[in-house]
Image (tube, coloured by chain):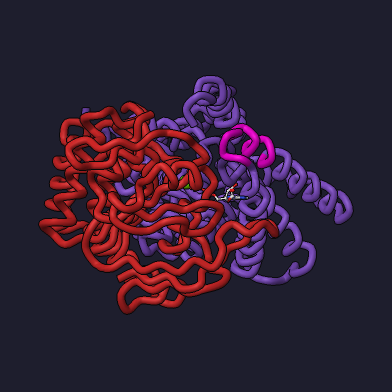
Chain colours: A red, B purple
Amino acid sequence: MISIRNLSHVIDGRPILHDITLDLPRGGITALIGPNGAGKSTLLSLIARLTRIQQGQITVDDLTVGASSDRDLAQRLAIMPQQANVSARLRVGELVAMGRYPWNRGRPGYEDRAQVAESLAKFGLTQLADRFLDQISGGQRQSALAAMAHAQGTDYLLLDEPLNNLDISAARGLMRLLRDMADAEGKSILIVLHDINYAAAYADRIVAMANGRIAADGAPDGVLTPQLMRDVFSSDADIIRVNGRPVVVV
Amino acid sequence: MRPVPLLTALLMALAALSLFTGVSNLTPRAVFTDPEATRLLLISRVPRTLAALLAGCALAVSGQIMQMLARNRFVEPMTAGAGQSAALGVLLATILLPGEPIWAKMGLAAGAALAGSAGLMALIRPLPPTQPLLVPLVALVYGGMIGAAVTFVAYQGDLLQYVEVWLTGELSGVLKGRYELLWLAGATAAATWVIADRVTLLALGDAAARGLGLNVTVVTAAGLAAISLSTALVVVTLGAIPFVGLVVPNLVARHTGDNLRAALPLTALTGAALVLAADIAARVIRQPFEIPVAAITGILGSMPFLLLLYRGRARV
Ligand SMILES: Nc1ncnc2c1ncn2[C@@H]1O[C@H](COP(=O)(O)OP(=O)(O)OP(=O)(O)O)[C@@H](O)[C@H]1O
Ligand SMILES: [Mg+2]
């Protein structure tokens, strides 16, 4: 379980997160939604210790973020950040293999290679494994970064807007893959989504954030209301039901 | 095309050529018949050839490591402050510790190079990644300023003629007994192989690398130490040789990419071939006079550099 206790964060004197307390039990997909600037990425980067915690506490199972070793956490939790600028000319396969670093410390063995091959295959990248990152499309690069997080093989997976640049088939493929990881392997997935319909269709739980606070939290059915659209997104988008599922009419 | 065997063959050919190129005529046959020729070979030509190979390896490898640490393709230690700092260090050692052994001077030069490259890293860290050309600009100005300080100190200490020796690399003075420190430079370059994977991870950015459990501080420090030691060793034994560390990693990156585990061996071989070829050219272009090898690599290297700046702008 990831538990977040009284987490507050300030950047340049501006409060970004206000006293957030949230539990993410093991297993299942939690979608984090909210308008631009709500603090979703900040929250994710604090959980994944990419940013130092200023106030409050986060634990992942028995590990305390900020106190436990980077390596222990890296074996437990993987993150795919919203923006990843890979500054070097690397091949897709090499990038995905980097996800194995917490386990092999740079000496890949048979198991690592098998895992990398599996991740490449699951994300439809096997054909592209030997291409350089600057020789593939934006969506393919996005898939490669997701595959790298997948190859890390952790119980917890944090994904910050992984559907960016993905076409509908790739987006649905990724969501189905995550669903399968949650159901069959018991993985716990926290995913930032802007397309609320994907959240409604694939997540077990939706957490909505606004202005650095949790605005709503619960099963998609209960959370997705016209009221939420107004309060959190300041939008009058309608919500209808299709096959018993809430769908936002854009 | 398998680049490693190809480069190895090229290196062997260049080495053979280097052994028999020079002012005094030396033929392969004479080596076995004429004791004077054997002496020339062992005391001058073999050491000179080895020195070029070792320096080339060390320069190219440290260039590649620095480019990964700086996350920028357009920097190399020799022109970006580390080379000039090493010269400053050895100059200060000459003034302040005149009687000390070469090891002490070497230590001061390496320490100064480390301070110089750490200073550069601190300077370029805040630069926006969207403006990759700012980094080489800042690096050149920074290196130039330290170079100016070297000249100033030397002028005050009446040591200008030495400064020329350290700031302009050449191999005409290489003899048995005067180049052996370069083995340490070669060994340092080889040792970076051990941290190759870790340095490659830095390409993801500090935060993401830390997210994978990498100790970013330690890896960066180890990389800087290797760069500084190699640079200082080359400056103290041969003098500064520019652009090798810039051009070679870029050539290798085009072909093989930046995964250092795969790229470093190629970089080392290519760097060795480049410096050796440049030194052979330095010996023959104006026979019987020699041109400093630094001038040749400066010319050979600056043109691809300009091309790179011109074409690479879009990608980096
Ligand atoms: N490095 C920074 N310096 C200053 N302010 C920042 C910085 N990073 C984020 N912020 C601010 O913090 C707030 C939350 O940013 P965050 O990236 O967490 O939003 P988000 O919910 O992920 O938004 P988006 O949906 O656009 O990705 C924003 O108001 C943003 O302007
Ligand atoms: Mg965000």
Whole-percent x, y for residue B209 in the image: 41, 56
Whether residue B7 appears in this view of the structure is yes
Nearest the eye: A228 or A87: A228
- The answer to whether B40 is drawn above or below residue B195 in the figure is above
Whole-percent x, y for residue B56 in the image: 46, 42
Instruction: Look at the image and give the residue range highlighted in magenta.
Output: B128-139
Decide if residue B293 is on the left or right side of residue A114: right
Q: Residue at x 50, y 55 (%)?
A: A42
Nearest the eye: B132 or B269: B132
Whole-percent x, y for residue B253 in the image: 39, 34
Whole-percent x, y for residue B71 in the image: 51, 44
Point out the image quarter for the N terminus of chain A. Answer: bottom left
Decide if residue B33 is on the left or right side of residue A15: left
Q: How many marks?
A: 0
The reply to whether the magenta stretch includes residue B16 is no
Decide if residue A118 is on the left or right side of residue A166: left
Decide if residue A29 is on the left or right side of residue A229: left
Location of residue B20 (image quadrant): top left
Whether residue B262 appears in this view of the structure is no
Q: Residue at x 68, y 53 (%)?
A: B85
Point out the image quarter for the C terminus of chain A. Answer: top left
Q: Residue at x 72, y 64 (%)?
A: B93
- The answer to whether A238 is drawn above or below residue A102 in the figure is above
Nearest the eye: B253 or B160: B253
Nearest the eye: A232 or A139: A232
The reply to whether the magenta stretch includes residue B136 is yes
Location of residue B17 (image quadrant): top left
- The answer to whether B136 is drawn above or below residue A154 in the figure is above
Q: Residue at x 32, y 66 (%)?
A: A24
